[in-house]
Image (spheres, rainbow, N blue to C red):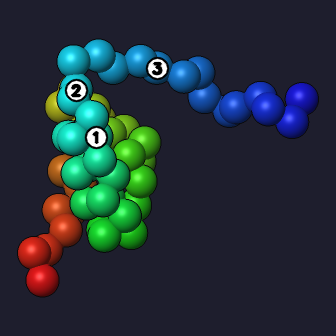
Amino acid sequence: MASAHKHKQRIVRGIDDQLVADFDAAAKQAGSNRSEITRHLWEWYVGRPGAQLPERPTDD
């Protein structure tokens, strides 16, 4: 199936549209995307071995 995804889609509620837009812009500036950064944050939060917080983009 062409539209099948590797990972199950998750829904996160309670995040306003402006925060999503700001997050996407910051992720793009850091050379990443929302899914990758969110996965890193979750891995760090639950204490997975070797997990680190993702780098934040600079204000430059």
For the residues labelled 3 and 2, the Cα–Cα distance comes to 14 Å
Residue 29: image x %, image y %? 31, 70
Name the residue beneath numbered marker 2: 15
- Other residues around mark 1 within 10 Å, as few (<14) / some (14–19) / many (≥20): few
For mark 2, give the secondary structure.
loop
Q: Is residue 47 above or below residue 60?
A: above
Q: Which mark is residue 20?
A: 1
Q: Position of residue 23 (x, y in %)?
A: 25, 49
Label 2 near label 1: C-beta < 8 Å?
A: yes
Identify residue type, mark 2.
Answer: Ile
Q: Is residue 37 left or right of residue 19?
A: right
Residue name at image x 86 percent, y 36 percent? 2
Q: Earlier in the sequence, mark 3 or mark 2?
A: 3
Q: Tell me the quarter of the image containing the C terminus.
A: bottom left
Q: Give residue 20's quadrant in the image.
A: top left
Crowd tier of the residue under label 2, counting other residues whose Cα lies within 10 Å: few below 14, some 14–19, many 20 or above: few
Query: Which amino acid type is marked by label 1?
Result: Val
Earlier in the chain: of badge 1 and badge 2, it is 2
Query: Of all residues shown, which one is farthest toward the front?
Result: 18
Q: Are marks 3 and 2 in contact (CB under 8 Å)?
A: no
Residue that badge 3 annotates: 10
Q: Residue at x 77, y 29 (%)?
A: 4
* Residue lying furthest right: 1
| Earlier residue among tags 3 and 1 | 3
- Given residues 43 and 55, the one toward you in this image is 55
Q: Residue furthest bottom?
A: 60
Residue 14: quadrant of the picture: top left
